[in-house]
Image (cartoon, rainbow, N blue to C red):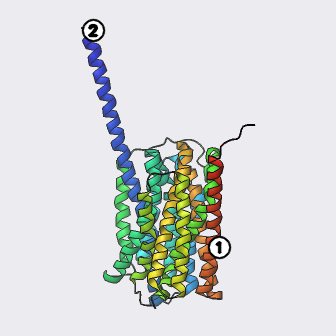
């Protein structure tokens, strides 16, 4: 009789453990889907405005400096949010910070949906940058809480897919939908409102800890275990995000010249999609493989693609330009995946938001600052000369990165000589 009782208890324990594992797996999957979708909306919304800039110029007579201000204010407030609020969810929890970010983003979308001039757009972009900075670190950390490897992959893949999809979708709405200057923002506001409700369906993944006010001091927080890895991936990461800044800011203008000004309203969205879609495909194809190998292949793709971008500009060939942008975009995806896979496993649960914020500060600085400077350089030296100088610097940095990776691999594989 006692033996039967022990067997029943053992079987019950096995079934309970199995059921608990199934429930944990289901919960993790739900967190990955919901947080991944919200991240998709936030980062895609940042690219949805790209096809509208020519309309702001044509219909509102917005000057180039004002359009550059709309680009710069978004990057500035995003970086300030990452510096001040990047680690906030490590202390308050993921869900409250995500709800706060969604609320601010909805206000930003409503501001853009009723904008009557470029000043309204600048105010909306300022709020959008603030919301995106708060959301990015919290969502990335929440994804990694659910699953370190898959969460890191989603954090890297979503920006590429969302920017490609929503930039192209926005361009189609500009072409075919009513009220082209505002319609896309109404849709985004509605999607964000629904996503706020979806957050109730996921559990909190970290407990609250003291020190929330101290965490608001502007700082870069990289856990000690991840500092060496962050320094190793920095050159390659800076190079590809500066490349993305070039192609997403000056790319539509370059493409318009390469197409003899025949691109129409779809061209801006097409350029973003041509860069980001291959980046996403490259990440999916290379889910396996050593991190250093991904970084090296990414650098090679950039070294092949960027010269084609320049050739397309100088011989006025849209096809050559787009092929080069696609190859360079694949390099962007491989490098980002290799970088994230290198640093993500090195942070503990209450360090992940701070690490994610630090990574995105580095990335968005590389994305925005050189492109912003290049926008003013175009006015002084012309588009071709500016693009030539920009691409030359990126090629140099990428070549140095590739050389450094090769040296690191050689030192890792070199056998130690015995005396």
Residue 343 in the image: state x and y as whole percent.
56, 50
- The answer to whether one can see residue 74 in this image is no
**In the rendered image, the vertical position of residue 282 relative to residue 288, given as above or below:** below
Kind of element beneath mark 2: helix
Residue at x-position 44% and y-position 80% = 268
Residue at x-position 36% and y-position 58% = 195
**Residue named by callout 1:** 393
Residue 250 in the image: state x and y as whole percent.
53, 80
Q: Nearer the viewer, residue 112 or 219?
A: 219
**In the rendered image, the vertical position of residue 172 relative to residue 8, given as above or below:** below
**Residue named by callout 2:** 2
- Callout 1 touching callout 2 (CB < 8 Å): no
**In the rendered image, the vertical position of residue 266 relative to residue 205, given as above or below:** below
Residue located farthest toward the right when viewing the structure as drawn: 419
Q: Nearer the viewer, residue 221 or 1?
A: 1
Q: Earlier in the sequence, mark 1 or mark 2?
A: 2
Residue at x-position 41% and y-position 65% = 162
Image-quadrant location for residue 172: bottom left
Residue 198 in the image: state x and y as whole percent.
35, 54
As drawn, is 256 to the left or to the right of 234?
Answer: left
Q: Nearer the viewer, residue 234 or 222?
A: 234
Image-quadrant location for residue 13: top left
């Amino acid at each position: 009789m006692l033996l039967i009782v022990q067997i029943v208890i053992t079987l019950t324990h096995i079934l309970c453990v199995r059921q608990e594992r199934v429930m944990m797996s289901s919960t993790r999957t739900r967190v990955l889907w919901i947080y991944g979708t919200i991240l998709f909306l936030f980062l895609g919304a940042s690219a949805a405005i790209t096809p509208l800039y020519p309309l702001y110029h044509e219909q509102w007579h917005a000057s180039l400096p004002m359009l550059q201000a709309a680009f710069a204010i978004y990057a500035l407030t995003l970086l300030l949010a990452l510096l001040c609020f990047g680690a906030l969810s490590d202390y308050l929890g993921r869900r409250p910070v995500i709800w706060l970010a969604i609320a601010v983003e909805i206000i930003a979308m409503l501001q853009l949906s009723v904008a009557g001039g470029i000043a309204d757009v600048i105010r909306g972009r300022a709020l959008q940058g603030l919301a995106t900075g708060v959301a990015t670190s919290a969502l990335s950390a929440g994804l990694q809480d659910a699953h370190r490897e898959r969460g890191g992959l989603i954090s890297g893949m979503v920006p590429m897919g969302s920017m490609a999809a929503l930039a192209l979708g926005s361009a189609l709405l500009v072409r075919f939908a009513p009220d082209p200057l505002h319609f896309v923002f109404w849709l985004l506001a509605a999607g964000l409102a629904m996503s706020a409700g979806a957050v109730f369906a996921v559990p909190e993944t970290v407990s609250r800890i003291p020190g929330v006010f101290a965490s608001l001091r502007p700082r870069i927080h990289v856990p000690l275990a991840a500092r060496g890895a962050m320094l190793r991936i920095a050159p390659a990461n800076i190079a590809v995000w500066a490349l993305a800044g070039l192609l997403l800011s000056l790319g539509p203008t370059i493409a318009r010249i390469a197409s003899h000004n025949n691109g129409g309203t779809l061209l801006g969205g097409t350029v973003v999609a041509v860069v980001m879609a291959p980046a996403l495909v490259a990440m999916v194809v290379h889910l396996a493989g050593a991190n250093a190998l991904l970084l090296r292949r990414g650098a090679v793709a950039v070294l092949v693609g960027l010269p084609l971008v320049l050739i397309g500009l100088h011989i006025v060939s849209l096809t050559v330009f787009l092929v080069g942008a696609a190859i360079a975009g694949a390099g962007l995806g491989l490098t980002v995946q290799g970088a994230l896979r290198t640093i993500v496993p090195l942070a503990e649960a209450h360090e992940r938001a701070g690490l994610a914020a630090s990574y995105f500060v580095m990335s968005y600085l590389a994305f925005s600052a050189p492109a912003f400077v290049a926008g003013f350089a175009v006015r002084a030296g012309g588009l071709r000369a500016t693009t030539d100088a920009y691409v030359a610097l990126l090629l140099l940095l990428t070549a140095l990165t590739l050389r450094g990776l090769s040296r690191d691999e050689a030192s890792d594989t070199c056998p130690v000589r015995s005396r």
